[in-house]
Image (tube, rainbow, N blue to C red):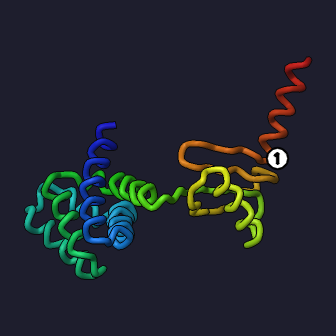
Amino acid sequence: MAGELVARRYAQALLDIGVERDNCETIREQLNQLAQLLEEVPAFSSVLLNPSLRLSERRDVIRAIADKYKWDPVVRNFSLILLDNHRVDVAGAIARQFGEMVDKRLGNIRAHVTSAVELDATQRAEIKAALVKLTGKNVLLETDTDAEILGGAITRIGSVVYDGSTRSHIERLRQSILAEV
């Protein structure tokens, strides 16, 4: 919980700068890149979190990564501040919070639809249109497949789940039958 509060404060500060400079999308992409590197490249996170290395050496690593990936100076400086303040470990949470704040500011909402089979473009468009009507917001739709749901779809919007899967219907039917016995 404390990590989320810290992440929210850092994300808000970064959002204020992004809005002022009109580069929130660039910051979002590069902040996600930092979080991904920390998560997927153990050597990178080990170096940054290693207190036995001098801070100046760890700062040089961030500068080198920022140069390699051509990060905006705001993201480079922000990464250095995270390092200086011993907050590198919450970079992923900050990236998530920042992304949510940018989406909210732009009137976007992210929806994740899991279906038993791959959805074609028409089906995705129909689902997106229904979700736009339901939420009144611009829907950024992500899809994936899971054969275990058998049919139908499961839609997640934030913490709300709409379960229209065949598997779920079968389970509810099973529970009803057992309740009658």
According to the picture, the residue beneath numbered tag 1 turns out to be 166
* Residue 37 visible to the viewer: no
Question: Could you say which quadrant of the image residue 167 lies in?
Answer: top right
Q: Position of residue 57 (x, y in %)?
A: 11, 68
> From the viewer's perspective, is residue 72 above or below residue 15?
below
Query: Residue at 25% of width from left, 52% of height from top?
Result: 10
Question: Could you say which quadrant of the image residue 42 lies in?
Answer: bottom left
Nearer to me, 62 or 163 = 163
Q: Work out which quarter of the rendered image holds the N terminus and state it.
A: top left
Looking at the rendered structure, the secondary structure element under dot 1 is helix
Query: Residue at 51% of width from left, 59% of height from top?
Result: 108
Q: Position of residue 107 (x, y in %)?
A: 49, 58
> From the viewer's perspective, is residue 18 above or below residue 69?
above
26 displayed left or right of 57: right
Q: Position of residue 179 (x, y in %)?
A: 85, 20
52 displayed left or right of 157: left
Nearer to me, 133 or 102 = 133
Q: Amino acid at mark 1?
A: Thr
> From the viewer's perspective, is residue 89 above or below residue 45?
above
Query: Residue at 77% of width from left, 47% of height from top?
Result: 165
56 displayed left or right of 102: left
